[in-house]
Image (tube, grey):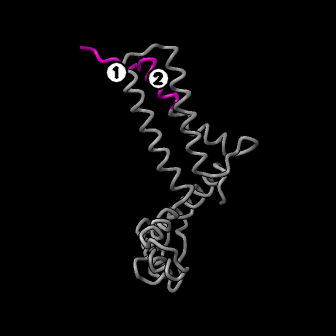
């Protein structure tokens, strides 16, 4: 039984829509169409991507299997895109919000720091994050100083800054 690797029109449209999502994000990141809130920007880009895919489907009259296959491909791209987007746009901001949620009441800055670090001093948080940078070899300890590694660390920082600028976020 021969295997056909050529996607059906509906699946091809879904693959094209997967590429459309970052393109729309770029379009909404700069110029007169800029959406200032990163969350709103992603939701709008994802929504426009899905609407474009669904509209394009009307031209090819797909069967149920092709629609489900295309939807799963586009859902995967949407989730992967959102994962990257949250890392680029917010980093640990959500964790800070969750610390306030866990407290169940307004907190002073000092109380928030303790809630955020789960009772440890704020420098414990910085040391924890430093541990991640050291483990990933993005930074290194040089005596009493912390330095970005010249290869991997610098490359990562340059690319992260480029992504943030590309998507209209503060670098």
Crowding at dot 2, Cα within 10 Å, few <14 / some 14-19 / many 20+, comes out as some
Crowding at dot 1, Cα within 10 Å, few <14 / some 14-19 / many 20+, comes out as few
Viewer-side label of 1, 2? 1
Point 62% across, 58% down: residue: 161
Point 62% across, 54% down: residue: 164
Region of the chain picked out in magenta, as a range? 1-17
Report the quarter where the N terminus lies: top left
Report the quarter where the C terminus lies: bottom right
Q: Residue furthest front?
A: 105
Point 57% across, 55% down: residue: 89
Residue 12, disc: 2
Circle 1 SS class: helix
The picture places residue 59, in percent across and down from the top left corner, at: 52, 14
The picture places residue 125, in percent across and down from the top left corner, at: 46, 77
The picture places residue 52, in percent across and down from the top left corner, at: 56, 27
Residue 2, disc: none
Circle 2 SS class: helix
Residue 118 placement: quadrant: bottom left
Up/down of 54 relative to 41, above or below: above
Residue 6 part of the magenta-drawn span: yes
Mark 1 or mark 2: whose residue is earlier in sequence: 2
- Residue that carries the numbered disc 1 in the rendered image: 65
Residue 135 placement: quadrant: bottom left
Residue 59 part of the magenta-drawn span: no
Residue 145 placement: quadrant: bottom right
Q: Are marks 1 and 2 in contact (CB under 8 Å)?
A: no
Task: For marks 1 and 2, give the CA distance.
Answer: 13 Å
């Amino acid at each position: 039984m021969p295997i056909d690797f050529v996607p059906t029109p509906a699946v091809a449209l879904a693959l094209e829509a997967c590429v459309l999502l970052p393109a729309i994000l770029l379009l909404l990141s700069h110029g007169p169409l800029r959406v200032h809130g990163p969350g709103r920007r992603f939701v709008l880009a994802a929504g426009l991507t899905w609407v474009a895919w669904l509209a394009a489907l009307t031209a090819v009259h797909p069967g149920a299997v092709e629609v489900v296959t295309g939807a799963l491909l586009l859902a995967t791209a949407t989730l992967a895109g959102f994962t990257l987007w949250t890392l680029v746009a917010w980093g640990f901001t959500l964790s800070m919000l969750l610390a306030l949620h866990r407290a169940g009441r307004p907190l002073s800055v000092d109380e928030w720091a303790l809630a955020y670090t789960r009772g440890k001093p704020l420098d414990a948080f910085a040391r924890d994050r430093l541990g991640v940078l050291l483990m990933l070899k993005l930074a290194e300890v040089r005596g009493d100083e912390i330095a970005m590694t010249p290869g991997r660390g610098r490359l990562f920082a340059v690319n992260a800054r480029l992504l943030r600028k590309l998507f209209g976020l503060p670098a």
